[in-house]
């Protein structure tokens, strides 16, 4: 079992207040957050949705890398992005994954199968109860 810790310190009311998220387990940084950064433009601050997008794209790459290695076709390079959509008053509504992969010796049909399986089974996908889409491209 592995635990990871982050802490947020928030001051003020939602609309005009702000906070700082600290990634404590890794110690790699402190990131400012605010409601306007979440619901309008980031302006140099992050949001829970951006942090979820980072987690989803990283988790997806790890899951697919594992599946590709088990298939006997380890990737040379995976570049995954995630766009997490937040609708004020509704919440998080979807995560859209994109992938460009360089995997020598793998045909597109098998690649799409493995990519879809990794989308469904990566732990972050399983933790999200929203629509998850995937646009996967096998390059080169």
Image (cartoon, rainbow, N blue to C red):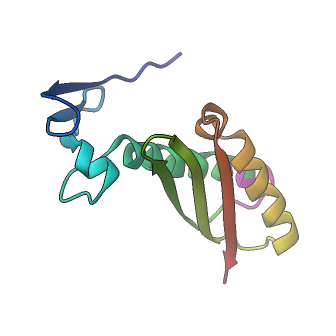
Residue 97, image quadrant: bottom right
- Quarter of the image with the C terminus is bottom right
Q: Position of residue 2 (x, y in %)?
A: 48, 19
Q: Residue furthest right?
A: 109
Residue for point 24% across, 49% down? 36
Residue for point 43% across, 19% down? 3
Give the answer, above or below, for where 1 lies relative to 51. Answer: above
Residue for point 50% across, 53% down? 85
Please check the rendered image and state whether residue 70 is part of the magenta-colored stretch, yes or no: yes
Nearest the camera: 47 or 104? Answer: 47
Nearest the camera: 85 or 109? Answer: 85
Residue 122 shown left or right of residue 12 in the figure: right
Nearest the camera: 123 or 74? Answer: 123
Q: Residue furthest front?
A: 89
**Visible in this render: residue 107?**
no
Residue 139, image quadrant: bottom right
**Visible in this render: residue 90?**
yes
Q: Position of residue 59 (x, y in %)?
A: 55, 44
Tell me where the magenta segment starts and ends, as one range.
68-74
Give the answer, above or below, for where 1 lies relative to 112. Answer: above
Nearest the camera: 99 or 2? Answer: 99
Q: How many marks?
A: 0
Q: Position of residue 57 (x, y in %)?
A: 52, 52
Please check the rendered image and state whether residue 89 is part of the magenta-colored stretch, yes or no: no
Give the answer, above or below, for where 128 lies relative to 87. Answer: above
Give the answer, above or below, for where 6 lies relative to 42. Answer: above
Residue 28 shown left or right of residue 85 in the figure: left
Q: Position of residue 23 (x, y in %)?
A: 27, 32
Q: Residue furthest bottom?
A: 140
Residue 61 shown left or right of residue 109 in the figure: left
């Amino acid at each position: 079992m592995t635990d990871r810790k982050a802490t947020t310190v928030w001051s003020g009311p939602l609309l005009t207040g702000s906070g700082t998220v600290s990634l404590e387990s890794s110690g790699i940084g402190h990131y400012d957050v605010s409601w306007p950064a979440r619901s309008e433009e980031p302006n140099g601050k992050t949001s829970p949705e951006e942090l979820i997008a980072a987690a989803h794209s990283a988790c997806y790459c790890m899951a697919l890398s594992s599946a590709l290695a088990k298939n006997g076709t380890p990737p040379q390079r995976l570049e995954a992005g995630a766009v997490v959509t937040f609708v004020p008053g509704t919440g998080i509504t979807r995560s859209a994954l994109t992938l460009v992969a360089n995997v020598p010796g793998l045909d597109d049909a098998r690649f799409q199968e493995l990519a879809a399986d990794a989308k469904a089974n990566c732990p972050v996908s399983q933790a999200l109860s929203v629509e998850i889409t995937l646009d996967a491209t096998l390059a080169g």
